[in-house]
Structure formats: structure tokens, C-alpha cells
Image: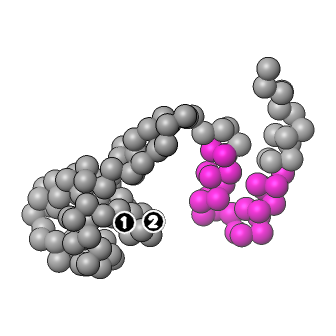
Amino acid sequence: MSRSEFNAGAFYRALDSARTAKDLNWKQVAAGSGVSASTLTRLAQGKRPDVDSLAALVGWSGLSADEFVSGQKSEPEALAKITSLLSFDTRLNDDSREMMIGMVTAAYERLRRPIA
């Protein structure tokens, strides 16, 4: 299995295209996304962003981080998808969310078929 890597250069170029399309300068990108100007400078130098900066820039730009990951990708497990969806369901409070994840996980583990 090949190792997955984040292509910071491609992400920066796409981010720059988003910036240009919005007719903004980098200082405005920093302010709008909530990341520091130094983070954007490091990106321009080919360095990878930390996970919080990446999340902020993906949110600001509308880009998908998945598009910039190279290497072999596999389909996420069904339970991982369901858990992820429940984790961000704003209609559930924290206790309800944890209870729902616990119930779904228990049911899934009990009812799934072994992989042949």
C-alpha cells in the first residue's frame, strides 16, 4: 500500500485561484479564513498547513482537502461514515449524540457479516 501525502503546492495553487476569483489579496484571505498571514506565507513556500489551518482554508475556499491527497484511497467503512454524520448532527445534544453512536455501533457490530 502506498503512503498518502498531502500536495501542499497544488492546494496553494487552487487556493490562489479561489483568492483571485474573489478578487482578494492574501491579507484579506487571512482575515476571512481566520488563519495567520504567516501560515499563508508558509503555504506559498511549499510547507503543509496544520490541520486547523487546513480546515479553515477548506471552509473558506469551498475546496475539498481530499482532492489534494495522493496515494491509494479506500472507501471508508460504513460505520465510520455513519459515526461521522452523527458526530456533526446539530439536532442532537452531546449526550444524545454519544448514545446514538453507541446504539448504532453496538447494532452494527452485532449484525454485520464477517468479511470472507
Question: How far is mark 1 from mark 2, CA to CA?
Answer: 6 Å
Pointer 1 residue: 49
Q: Position of residue 103 (x, y in %)?
A: 84, 51
Name above or below for residue 38 compared with residue 98: below
**Residue at point 20%, 53% (across, down):** 13
Report the residue at 71% width, 43% height from top: 79
Look at the image and tell me whether residue 69 can be seen.
Answer: yes
Q: Which residue is mark 2?
A: 51
Q: Which mark is residue 110?
A: none
Tell me the quarter of the picture where residue 97 sits: bottom right
| Residue 97 counted in the magenta span | yes
Helix, strand or loop status at disc 1:
loop
User: What's the amino acid at mark 1?
Assistant: Pro
- Which residue is painted at 78% across and 25% down in the image? 115
Which segment did they paint magenta?
A: 80-103
Image location of residue 86, percent across then percent down: 66, 54
Marks 1 and 2 close (CB-CB < 8 Å): yes
Q: 12 above or below 113?
A: below
The amino acid type found where label 2 is placed reads Val
Location of residue 32 by image quarter? bottom left
